[in-house]
Structures are given as structure tokens and as C-alpha cells.
Image: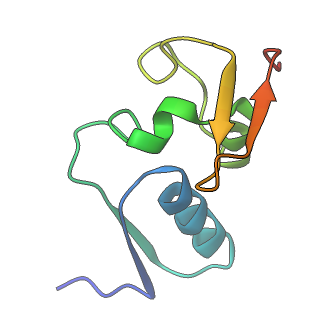
Amino acid sequence: MEKYDVIVVGAGPAGVAAAKASGKTGAKTLLIEKAPTIMANKPCGQATSQETLKTAEVKPEPDIVLNKAYAIVYAPNMNYVKIDRIGS
């Protein structure tokens, strides 16, 4: 049986970032994801910024980034932020 220092369950943006950070410390890290592609089927992936992809060192290939769009992000108290330009 393999032994790991860190096991991360879920390869969404947070899981990928956690696994990356863990691996960079030298910890033997296992990232587990039930979907066949990393981040492609995550609800939060529908609004993941390009900066998040850069931080996670995920290349924005066509099967991951389907559209670039503007957005309005609402907080539970209905305050919102408009993201009215597409970043690079």
C-alpha cells in the first residue's frame, strides 16, 4: 500500500492549489478526483478566473475554458461586483 503525507480529495481550483502547495514542500501528495478531467466539471469552474488558472498552473486549454465572459458576482446579502472586462 502506498503511503502519502497529504491526500487532497477533489481537483477543483482549491484542491489543485492545495495539492500544488503540498507538493512544492516536498510532501508526497495524492490528488483524488472522481471526474475524468480535472476542474472541467466543477460548479466553481464555471466562474474561475484566468488568474486562478495561472496560480494553479493549469493551462487554459479548450476542454477546460469553454467561454470567456463578463460576470456579475453576487454575495448572499445581494451586494455584487461587476466584472465588466475580460482579463488576459
Q: Is residue 54 left or right of residue 26?
A: right
Image quadrant containing the C terminus: top right
- Counting every numbered tag in the picture gives 0
Q: Position of residue 86 (x, y in %)?
A: 78, 15
Front residue of this view, candidates 59 and 66? 66
Name the residue at 28% across, 55% down: 33
Q: Is residue 41 left or right of residue 82?
A: left
Image quadrant containing the N terminus: bottom left
Up the image or down, 34 lies above or below 66; here it is: below
Name the residue at 78% across, 25% down: 83
Q: Residue furthest front?
A: 77
Query: Colour scheme in the image?
Result: rainbow
Name the residue at 40% across, 54% down: 11
Name the residue at 59% across, 23% down: 60
Q: Position of residue 35 (x, y in %)?
A: 23, 44
Q: Position of residue 77 (x, y in %)?
A: 64, 55
Instruction: Give residue 69's quadrant in the image.
Output: top right
Q: Is residue 11 left or right of residue 83?
A: left
Up the image or down, 10 lies above or below 21; here it is: above
Front residue of this view, candidates 55 and 22? 55
Q: Is residue 76 left or right of residue 46?
A: right
